[in-house]
Image (cartoon, rainbow, N blue to C red):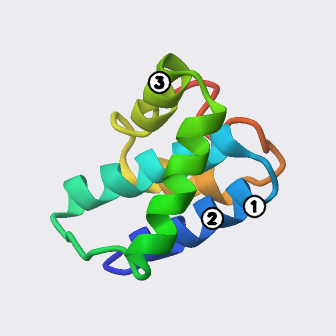
Amino acid sequence: MVYLPWYLEGLASLAAAQGGYLRATELDGARDALRTQTGVFLPPVHPAGYLKVVQAARDHLTPAAFDAARTRAASKAPPQIIAAVSDWSRPSSAFTGPD
């Protein structure tokens, strides 16, 4: 669990590179949710690069969509977050469906 936020940063970067800004934002929110829930606050692996990913997502979404996407994972338990981000068959939104 310690390094999982770093993997989520990588997945968010991949999603943004493919134009999946909503998914990238959800992954960013999932990263923050896991950091909060586990109490492990490692800084981004590549802070400047990751800030560019988050800014690109922010630039491509409305403020309301960005904020909503970032908070979708906040109420999820770590196993739910891992399951959601592992399902790339749902490219537009990782956290839709029942809790």
Mark 1 residue crowding within 10 angstroms, few (<14) / some (14–19) / many (20+)? some
Query: Which residue is identified by label 3?
Result: 68
In the rendering, which numbered label is found on residue 17? 1
Q: Which residue is mark 2?
A: 13
Asked where in the image residue 29 lies, by quadrant, the reply is top left
Q: CA gap, disc 1 to disc 3?
A: 21 Å
Please give the name of the residue rendered at 44% of the width and 80% of the height, measured from the top-left corner.
46
Q: What residue is rendered at 47% in x and 24% in y?
A: 68
Amino acid type at circle 3 is Ala
Q: Is residue 98 above or below residue 7?
A: above
Disc 1 + disc 3, Cβ < 8 Å = no
Neighbour tally class for label 2: few under 14, some 14-19, many 20 plus, Cα within 10 Å: many
- Using the image, determine if residue 13 lies above or below residue 37: below
| Residue type marked 1 | Ala
- Residue 66 percent across, percent down from the top left: 51, 30
Task: Please state which amino acid type lies under the numbered disc 2.
Answer: Ser
Under circle 2, the secondary element is helix
Asked if marks 2 and 3 touch (Cβ < 8 Å), the reply is no
- Quadrant location of the N terminus? bottom left
Q: Position of residue 72 (x, y in %)?
A: 46, 32
Residue 38 lies left or right of residue 34; in this view the side is: left
- Where disc 1 sits, the SS reads helix
Spatial separation of the CA atoms under disc 2 and disc 1: 6 Å
In-image side of 20 versus 60 (left or right): right
Front label number (1 vs 3): 1
Q: Observer-nearest residue: 15 or 52?
A: 52
Nearest to the observer: residue 65 or residue 51: 51
